[in-house]
Image (cartoon, rainbow, N blue to C red):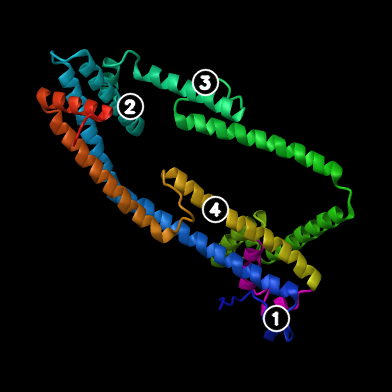
Amino acid sequence: MSRKTSLEISSRVASTKLTPEQERFNFLIAQIEKARATLAEWEAAVAAFRQTRLQKLQPLHDSLSRACRESVFAVDRLLDQTGWSRVERAELREILRGTADVLLEANGADAEIKALYDKHSEVDFDTSRQDELQQLKAEAEEFTGLDLGDDDGILSEEDLVERMYREMAAREAADAAREDAKAQRRRESATKRRGEDSAQLARQSLREIYRRLASAVHPDREPDPVRREEKNVLMQRINQAYAANDLLTLFEAQMQIEQLDAGAIAKIGQQRLRQYNRLLAEQLSKAKETLREAKVAFVMDHGLEQHGDAQPQKLLHVIQGQARRLRAEIARQEQFLRVLASKASTRRWLKQQRRFAYGDDDD
């Protein structure tokens, strides 16, 4: 059974069977409150996730970074020794550059690691990164058909992605403007005009509620300092709700200052109720879209794979899985450091890797 709220129209208060518009009003109110609760639950879970992730994963990231950094210096020391074949020296340099590249990508400016990358590369790190970005930019332009402009301001892949999204948004806005212009020219049917009139009436209803609230709550008319501060907070909430077409919050504010009660809600006329339902339907759609965007942004920000609908209660399991993978990678990196401890073990390891690559190893 759904939870009844103070805003729902009760058949007992209405003293008659609820009309379809009243039923729809109750349904929309309940769905918006459910969406609000889900978003609040999601935001709380994400906050807990970020805090726990920082506490549990950051030390592991730091340990892995230190181990990788040590391996770069270890390979550099090995390369300073004589007796390596041309193939072995090339393989070691590739390992050093690859590890250094990962470290510089993750940790930003590390002068020592960058110097070692440059020492063992024909092209320095900054030039190599800029060449990669130019290639990515060219591929993005070819794929999207966008002109991403010159290279100024594109210093990382994040800058490139931001530029691409900005240009895509501009193109979509231009396309939307053209479509709106076409639609404007086509708006001649009676059905269209009725829809526009209905939307205008719905906005007018919202504005009337806002004006009544603003007149009753405006803090400048309150002499008591404590009450003035309370009204100031409430007025800010009302202004934000009006700007966002948040009819439910305006209703709640009316109930808070006793401009509205269950009896008054039950007496709302069908035409006005239809206007309210239009606004509530738009609010529900926006609430669902806000939740969807929050989930997509979270998944993208943390490099997570999206398998179906992300659930807040499952986020901490994601941290446990990431921690296991990090500990395994740390163990592999520490094992590799033991290999790099001597020239002989490194040479054996390189030979084994070549055998793996060619599929010649029986183990």
Q: Using the image, determine if residue 303 lies above or below residue 227.
A: above
What residue did someone put label 4 on? 292
Where is residue 165 drawn, in percent x and y? Answer: 56, 35
What residue did someone put label 1 on? 263
The amino acid marked with disc number 3 is: Asp
The amino acid marked with disc number 2 is: Asp
Quarter of the figure with residue 222: bottom right
In front here: 154 or 171?
171
The amino acid marked with disc number 1 is: Gly
Circles 1, 2 touching at the beta carbon (< 8 Å)? no
Marks 3/2: CA–CA distance:
21 Å
Quarter of the figure with residue 46: bottom left
Q: Is residue 332 on the magenta stretch?
A: no
> Relative to 95, is 345 on the left or the right?
left
Q: What element carries label 1?
A: helix
Q: Is mark 2 on a helix, strand or loop?
A: helix
What residue did someone put label 3 on? 151
Q: Using the image, determine if residue 27 lies above or below residue 68.
A: below
The amino acid marked with disc number 4 is: Arg
Where is residue 112 drawn, in percent x and y? Answer: 25, 23
Residue at the image point whose x is 68% and y is 67% from the top: 216
Circles 4, 3 touching at the beta carbon (< 8 Å)? no
Q: Using the image, determine if residue 226 lies above or below residue 89.
A: below
Determine which of the numbered discs, if any, sits on residue 101 in the image.
2
> Relative to 321, is 252 on the left or the right?
right
Q: Is residue 282 visible?
A: yes
Q: Is mark 4 on a helix, strand or loop?
A: helix
